Amino acid sequence: MNKSNIKAAAIGVDLGGTNLRLGIVDQEGRILKSLKRPTLAKEGKDKVINRIVDLLRDAIETSKQLSGEVKGICIGAPGFLDTKRGIIRESPNLPGWKDVALKKEIEKRAHFPSILIQNDANGFTYGEWWRGAGKGYNSMVGITLGTGVGGGLILDKKIWSGEDGAAGEIGHMIVEPSGLKCQCGRYGCLESYSSGTGIVNRTIMALKKGVNSSLINRAEGNFSLIKSRMVFEEAVAGDELSLKIIEEAGRYLGIAVSSLINILNVYRFVIGGRVASAGDLILKPAREEIFKRALNLSAKGEVIIQASLEDDAGIIGTAGMVFESLNRKTLSSAT
């Protein structure tokens, strides 16, 4: 790809609890270069922020060879954020991060192009809407099924962040009012049933009650060794308990999605994250539940599908949000 063909680039960053991923992305959503480093979150926030700054410096230098000017940077971070002020209020994946002014901390350490801080689920959602499985839709909901459940909303071609930047907490929709206690302290949240953690916890609860399963031998009797991937694999092999747990996770997902369809009048839901790799094991029961509960679904096609960008959705999406922000500023200054 010739540098002269690339007018501008943006840097998208996916700040995870395990890895820090960065991409230099052009205006067509193509990743020109990607970089990856371990987050090493246990070393504390200052060392993580320094690592982000070092990675951004490397990316800026690399971009000079690839694309010329970097128009801006957007960092997708996990947890509860104040996106307007660039503050991470709290993040379960980043121990000790409470009220961290990430944008200000980075700007104190180095002079970079304009920096945005966004929720990582919004980055995933924007990426899939801009260049992935939601491309061509005016509105879309992205749902990430990983350790927890995250979500992002695109309404009329714009990210909807809500009054305080906290919209999209789909994992804390109540799907079973008298259900399991969630880590948020409430009962019956989707996250307690359809996240990787929820799937593992419910599997272990059943095993402790004496339900038979091939997982007992797989884990050599040590239930703490059970991972969501093992449950998926045993479900594929025909284990009844694993199949039941995954099917129920899909049904609860379908209950949440059908409510969102009825409220938002949106007909494209893109599902990503580790749990989504179970494919039809989880999506088939979700679709069945959606078609039982949601209104006005005739001729809407496939409403809920797997993400298509895999691990790149976050960095493509956050970079895309830089371009979207610049376009808004251009339109605003022209009026």
Image: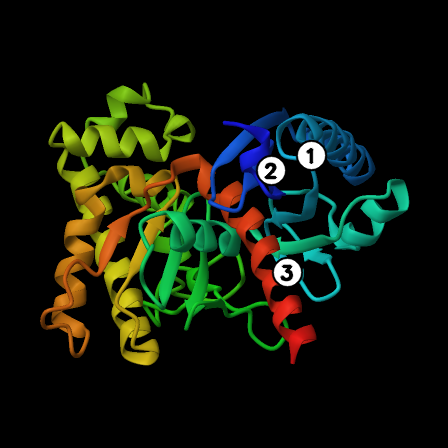
Assess disc 3: are there few (<14), some (14-19) or many (≥20) residues with their C-alpha within 10 Å of its C-alpha.
some
Q: Position of residue 327 (x, y in %)?
A: 59, 63
Quarter of the image that includes the C terminus: bottom right
Q: CA distance from mark 2 to mark 3?
A: 29 Å
Q: Position of residue 142 (x, y in %)?
A: 39, 57
Nearer-the-camera pick, 141 or 290: 141
Q: Which residue is mark 3?
A: 326
- Give the vertical position of 187 relative to 132 (above or below): below
The residue sitting at 21% across, 61% down in the picture is 303
Nearer-the-camera pick, 151 or 325: 325
Q: What's the residue type where badge 2 is placed?
A: Gly
**Which of pointers 1 and 3 lies earlier in the amino acid sequence?**
1
Q: What's the residue type where badge 1 is placed?
A: Ala
Q: Position of residue 67 (x, y in %)?
A: 63, 34
Camera sees residue 30:
yes
Q: Are the two marked residues, 1 and 2, in contact with CB atoms closer than 8 angstroms?
A: yes
Q: Which residue is mark 1?
A: 41
Q: What's the residue type where badge 3 is placed?
A: Leu
| Disc 2 secondary structure class | loop
| Disc 1 secondary structure class | helix
The residue sitting at 68% across, 48% down in the picture is 71
Q: CA distance from mark 1 to mark 3?
A: 31 Å
Picture quadrant of residue 205: top left
Q: Which residue is mark 2?
A: 17
- Give the vertical position of 99 relative to 124 (above or below): below
In screen coordinates, is 51 left or right of 3?
right
